[in-house]
Image (cartoon, rainbow, N blue to C red):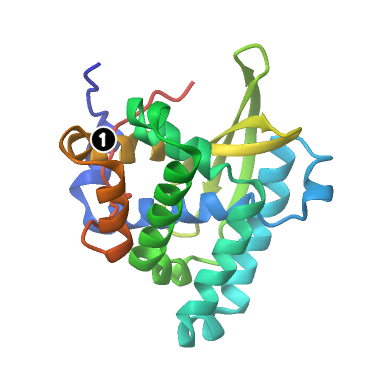
């Protein structure tokens, strides 16, 4: 399928600072819904998780900015700990890998997911500290898809300087709990973004080779590469 770039995406792509903001907000979006303990989170709908969690993460990044600036390892540890609760990294990684994910073992997919996550944090983690603490996340809808097996949460991130930014979250049930597996920022799916980036390499190289290169920093995961997705 050939995707045509939307006017909104062309504006984002033409401005390096906007592209970086897209990447930063995407990382916050991943972390934002992952702050609650499992017991508390399981009692909420995906929309409630997004709304109640996002400001807490943004506030933590603001309040601990000095600490995180002086110790990047602590920042990475904070984000990593939140991601392990509600984000289904294995499902997201399989979707990124496409056909290669269907034939890969669970261990191979998990290794790729871990390497991709660490690569992103090493590249963009410090940018999270530039997030405006005045960001306000507003839930706009919570829509069941595929007979309720998937929930799409749509939100707007209000900024003091700039137009609101649309961020959508896709959730599914895993082990009886709602877990997020994709984030769509201003029409850009992170899963599709990384699938596009790694598609060519996966046709000529093994998954293990790509995982090793991600881990070693020889490949830079790029959250700014974009394939527009229609916001419905």
- Outermost residue to the top: 147
The residue lying at 55 percent from left, 64 percent from top is: 79
Position of residue 138 relative to residue 37, above or below, is above
Q: Is residue 185 above or below residue 73?
A: above
Q: Is residue 85 above or below residue 77?
A: above
Q: Which residue is mark 1?
A: 196
Can residue 81 be seen from the camera position used here?
yes
**Which percent across, then down, holds residue 213?**
25, 57
How far from the left and from the top, in percent, is residue 26? Answer: 44, 50
Residue 124 versus residue 153: which sits nearer the camera?
Answer: 124
Question: Residue 150 occupies which quadrant of the picture?
Answer: top right
Q: Nearer the viewer, residue 21 or 220?
A: 220
Task: Give residue 114's position: percent from left, percent from top.
Answer: 45, 54
Query: What residue is shown at x 63% (from left), y 70% (from top)?
Result: 60
Q: Residue at x 41, y 26 (%)?
A: 102
From the viewer's perspective, tell me whether residue 178 is left or right of residue 126.
right
Q: In the rendering, at what x and y percent does residue 209 appear?
A: 25, 50
Report helix, strand or loop for mark 1. helix
Instruction: Give the vertical position of 149 relative to 77 (above or below).
Output: above
Location of the N terminus by quadrant is top left
Is residue 186 among what the camera can see? no
Q: Residues within 10 Å of mark 1 (few under 14, many from 20)?
A: some
| Front in this rendered view, residue 19 or 177 | 177
190 or 205, which is in the foreground?
205
């Amino acid at each position: 399928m050939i995707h045509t770039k939307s006017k909104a995406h062309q504006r984002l792509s033409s401005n390096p600072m906007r592209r970086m903001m897209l990447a930063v907000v995407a990382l916050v979006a991943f972390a934002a819904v992952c702050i609650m303990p499992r017991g508390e989170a399981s009692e909420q709908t995906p929309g409630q998780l997004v709304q109640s969690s996002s400001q807490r993460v943004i506030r933590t990044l603001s309040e601990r900015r000095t600490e995180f600036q002086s110790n990047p390892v602590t920042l990475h540890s904070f984000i990593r700990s939140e991601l392990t609760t509600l984000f289904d990294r294995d499902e997201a990684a399989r979707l990124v890998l496409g056909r290669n994910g269907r034939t890969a073992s669970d261990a191979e997919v998990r290794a790729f997911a871990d390497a991709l996550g660490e690569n992103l944090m090493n590249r963009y983690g410090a940018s999270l500290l530039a997030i405006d603490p005045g960001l306000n996340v507003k839930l706009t809808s919570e829509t069941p898809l595929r007979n309720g097996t998937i929930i799409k949460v749509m939100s707007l991130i209000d900024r003091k300087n700039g137009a609101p930014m649309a961020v959508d979250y896709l959730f599914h049930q895993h082990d009886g709990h709602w877990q997020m597996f994709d984030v769509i920022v201003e029409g850009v799916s992170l899963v599709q973004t990384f699938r596009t980036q790694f598609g060519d390499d996966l046709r000529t190289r093994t998954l293990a080779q790509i995982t090793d290169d991600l881990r070693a920093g020889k490949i830079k995961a790029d959250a700014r590469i974009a394939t527009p997705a229609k916001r419905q």
